[in-house]
Structures are given as C-alpha cells and as structure tokens.
Amino acid sequence: MIATNKLIDHTLLKPDATIDQIQSLCDEAKAHDFMSVCINPCWVAVAKNELKDSDVKVCTVIGFPLGANTPEIKVAETKQAIDNGADEIDMVLNIGQLKAGNLDYVTNEIAMVKQACGDHILKVILETCLLSDEQIVTACHCAQKAKADFVKTSTGFSSGGATVEAVKLMHDTVGNTMGVKASGGVKTKQQLQEMVDAGATRIGTSNGTKLV
C-alpha cells in the first residue's frame, strides 16, 4: 500500500497564484514528502529550484484547462516545460474532437505529447464531467493506445470534479496497464479513501496538508 503522502500531487493552478504561494506550496510538499507539486507552466523553473534538495517531483499542465490548443502547441508547451524542469506532464485531451468521434485525432495528439515527454510521466485529463460513460471508456482507450501513463479525471475548472463512479469506470477500463488520477474536489480523508478504493493511484488536490 502506497503511503497517503505519496499518493498526492499537491496542487495550485489558480490563475492568480503568486510566487510566494508557489514557494509555500513547495515548502508544504517538502515537509510532507508529497509525490509532486502540480502547478502552471510559468512556475516550473521556480518549483524545480525550490524542490532541488528533495525527491518531490514537479508536475505541470498542458493545454490547460480547455484542451483546445492545437497538437503542435501542446507539444511545444511540453518540451518547454521539460526543459524548465518538469518531471510529469498532465495534458488535457481535445474534448470536442473526442465527443465528435474523431478518435484518430485524439489518439495521435496524445501520442505526439507522449513522444515529447520521452521518459517523463504523461497523465491525460479526460474532463469526465463533460463525457458520457461510453466517452470516458473511449478516451481511456485512446490514452492507452497512445502509450500514456495515467488517465486523470478532471481539471478542476469545469462543471465538476472527480467522482467515485468515474474513477471506478476508468480503472475498470485500463486495469493495471495505466495509473488513474482522481483530481478535483477531493477534500477529506474519507473522499481520498473512496477514490483509492475505486482504483485511484494518484490524487490531485489543493488540500494535501489536511489529508495527511
């Protein structure tokens, strides 16, 4: 069983986050030995410097929060983020293309970003609140085919966050071939445990310090 602290991507993605808040986030992540901090791309270099004497990873988001950038922009964002020190990449898939049934587009875009990631972890954000169960399964299959490492529920910026039902469906679809990250609205220890019981192997939350 993974220790609770190592399940957590300690997250601050608000548009008005300041450097002081990012540094505080990193201090908290070091104090609790979280798996990573998850931050916007402009803060990657700052976080990498703050965390240089720890084993806390730097995670950033790509195509965030809408997923509607072109594939080439997502690839460029990814390469720059890794150059700046990112260890893990959480990309938003193209939700509109998925809902339109353009699965080659969705799969190829994820594969392009995975190629840009190289050995770095790639998590694919599905934004499950906007998808039917069938579309969630399809999105998982696209991410699997593209060799991503995780599927992730949510950005936290749409109409809903992680649900136990979505996490279970995602886990049932990918099995042990991929990780599942539950993100958005996980605020209590009970919610965290429910997500883990449903199959989550990583938790994205801004409430990490309360959960440990």
Image (cartoon, rainbow, N blue to C red):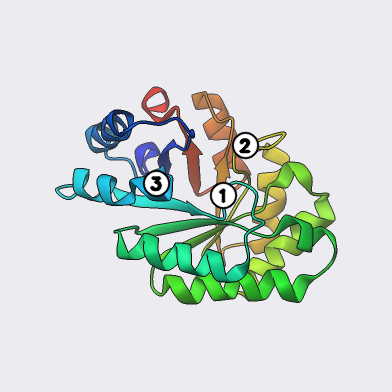
Labels 1 & 2 near each other (Cβ < 8 A): yes
Q: Is there CB contact under 8 Å for labels 3 and 1? A: no
The residue tagged 3 is 2
The kind of residue tagged 1 is Phe
Q: Give the secondary structure at mark 1.
A: loop
Farthest residue to the left: give it: 53
Q: Label 2: which residue? A: 157
Question: Which numbered disc flags the more N-terminal residue, 3 or 1?
Answer: 3
Residue at image coords 26%, 34%? 23
Q: CA distance from mark 3 to mark 2?
A: 28 Å
Identify the image quadrant of residue 170: bottom right
The residues tagged by marks 1 and 2 sit, at their Cα atoms, a distance apart of 9 Å
Residue at screen point 34% across, 45% down: 43
| Above-or-below relation of 18 to 122 | above
Crowd band around label 3 with a 10 angstrom C-alpha radius: few (<14), some (14–19), many (20+):
few
Query: Is residue 12 left or right of 100 when viewed as pictured?
Result: left
Q: Is residue 74 visible?
A: yes
Judged from the image, the secondary structure of the residue bearing numbered disc 2 is: loop
- Residue 158's mark? none
> Are there few (<14), some (14-19), or many (20+) residues within 10 Å of tag 2?
some
Q: Name the foreground residue: 45 vs 150.
A: 45
Camera-side mark, 3 or 1: 1
**Residue at 51% across / 69% down in the picture?**
75
* Amino acid of disc 3: Ile
User: Circle 1 is placed at which residue position?
Assistant: 64
Q: Secondary structure at mark 3?
A: loop
Q: Nearer the viewer, residue 20 or 133?
A: 20
155 with respect to 165 (left or right): left
| Marks 1 and 2, the one that precedes in the sequence | 1
